[in-house]
Image: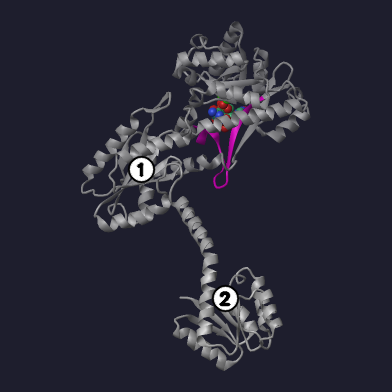
Amino acid sequence: MTKILVIEDEDSVRENLLELLELECFEAIAAENGRRGVQLAQEELPDLILCDVSMPELDGFSVLEQLRQSPRTAGIPLIFLTARSAPHDFRQGMRLGADDYLTKPFSQDDLLAAIATRLAKHAAITQPYIQVLQSITAEFSERLNYDPVTCLPTRLLLQEKFNQIRANQALTPILSLKIDHFDALCFCSDYTEDDLLRVITQRLLACLDMDDFLARLSDDQFVILLTNIKHRQSIHAICQQILVLLSQPFQLEQQDVFLTLSIGIALYPEHGPELNGLMHKANLVMHHVQQQGGNQYRFYTASVNPLQVERLALEASLRSALENAEFQVYYQPQLDLQTGKVLGAEALLRWHNRERGMVCPADFIPLAEESGLINPIGEWVLQTACQQTQRLRERGFPTLRIAVNLSGQQFSQSHLVQTISQILKITHLDPTALELELTETTLLQNQSEAISTLNDLKKLGIQIAIDDFGTGYASLSYLKQFPFDTLKIDRCFIHNVHSESYNNAITMAVLQMSQRLNLQVIAEGVEIPAELEFLQNHGCQTMQGFLFSRPLPVAEYEVLLAEGRGLFPLEVA
Ligand code: C2E
Ligand code: CA
Ligand code: CA
């Protein structure tokens, strides 16, 4: 209803006007003086104002002036009502922006005609703006409700749809779907994440009925609400169909892409009445399926291991750790046992999580490997370590080296050599200053590919070290087919190497063999002076360990370098 504000100090005139307006089906409100009129206009935002000119407190001109100053009220059409008819009054009113000027006495028809004209004019002016505003609002809610990449509904429409479906059918299955190793997949293929998501969406839709509901929840996570389901058997059939269809290779331009997904299923009402609880259960099973290797579907059961819950939570926070800048590279100095000087350092990843505090690599690296997150994380470590080492080299330590750990997953990426040479280029680090640490197990996973990758890395000038040497089952002669430069004797063999006969025998053998094969040896985990002394006496070239230094944040590492700290004062002590 159109709302009209009457500002008039004379009671009888005000009352008459109100009565007339109400008879004409307007919503009429009134103020008995100018000050109250301004206040009411701001509170009520009427569609039109009828305002007397001569009033005590605040006259009509001042009312108009004040209204025009506030953006909320500036556009409200205003008609002056006055007994004065002097031309200069009229001009002043118009100059201030009044829309019309009625001189008392006026007839009802005059008044209603003036109101109608004003309202029509105002509508003609504001209508286009209102339309623009409406279309912006519509576009905005469209954007919130529909994912621009896949055009699928987002989580915002899920609840509404769930309510609708639940009202019409006895059994509503909720399927939580996630692509297995999606990050790794995007990293390895030439296609963008968006390309992949679009083709995945096409295939999922092909498995569903018109009435079923498919939404994209986040990166590579989808949800399906199935309709017209009478028996569990039909859910099995649909899930099998999805798995089969999704596992067919995707042909994107020149490249075949293979992918699988994991599905967790919760049932309304069997597993709960509310969407949130059901989604939580479906997600839980879905993650469980992924941890078992993926490419499967499973129904929720109460027996989903509670330990999984903690793992899932850890994985979720690991996922956001890169974005939230929760990682840091620490540096553990490596020293030349002859000169006692720092040669460089091993880069070791640290995760400071807001809720969990410091999480040690042993607790999250395996999880990062399983979830594919190790690829972006490992790339970040490489880039950061190379960049910070290069900065230190430029600040007065020009021969400094850096050793970076590479996980099995990272090593088997098709882009690895390219990625590393790119990082070296960007950071300007001399490739001969970089050493990559790989374990025996990593090398043995795919031997012929490993040899060719190692050769490519060596062509760039990069050094290769075999980490944790002795803990795998490969013999040194077998390992020799891989082109590498350095052996790192695992710290379990260094422990009491001077006094424990088993460790002593192993370490001696490794040192003798590597001398013959012309390999460098690094002893890791040196904790006490007696171990150090043993290693020096038996020709080991390099060491790292708590005896000299724990892994340090880059600033502390720089201080240690700047102070020129080395091994020998230690030996004296
Ligand atoms: P690692 O490659 O064998 O690293 C050496 C580990 O021994 C480090 O543990 C280091 O802090 C610890 N250490 C060094 N000196 C001593 C010592 O004297 N005594 C004892 N008891 N320990 C010593 P950290 O930093 O907890 O790392 C554990 C493992 O996590 C590493 O073992 C490595 O396999 C993995 N890791 C760490 N950072 C990365 C990374 O950036 N990428 C990958 N792929 N793996 C990483
Ligand atoms: Ca290492
Ligand atoms: Ca090691």
354 magenta-colored: yes
Q: Quadrant of ligand 2?
A: top right
Q: Nearer the viewer, residue 325 or 5?
A: 5
**Amino acid type, mark 1:** Val
Q: Quadrant of the C terminus?
A: top right
Q: What is the total number of numbered labels drawn onto the structure image?
A: 2
Q: Position of residue 552 (x, y in %)?
A: 67, 33
Is the shortest distance between ligand 1 and the CB of mark 1 under 8 Å?
Answer: no
Residue 36 relative to residue 559: left or right: left
Distance from Cα at disc 1 to Cα at disc 2: 54 Å
Q: Label 2: how many residues lie within 10 Å, few (<14), some (14-19) or many (20+)?
A: few
Element type at mark 1: helix
Percent position (x, y) of residue 313? Answer: 46, 44
Q: Position of residue 178 (x, y in %)?
A: 39, 39
Location of mark 2 (residue): 43
Please tell me whether residue 39 is drawn above or below residue 446 in the rendered image: below
Residue extending farthest top? 516
**Who's the residue at 34% across and 39% down the image?**
204
User: Are dots 1 and 2 in contact, CB under 8 Å?
Assistant: no
105 and 365: which is toward the camera: 105
Magenta-colored span: 345-365
Mark 1 — residue? 285
In the picture shown, does residue 380 fall above or below 123?
above
Tell me if I can see residue 525 in this picture: no
Seen in the image, is 550 located left or right of residue 180? right
**Residue 355 x %, y %:** 55, 47
Amino acid type, label 2: Glu
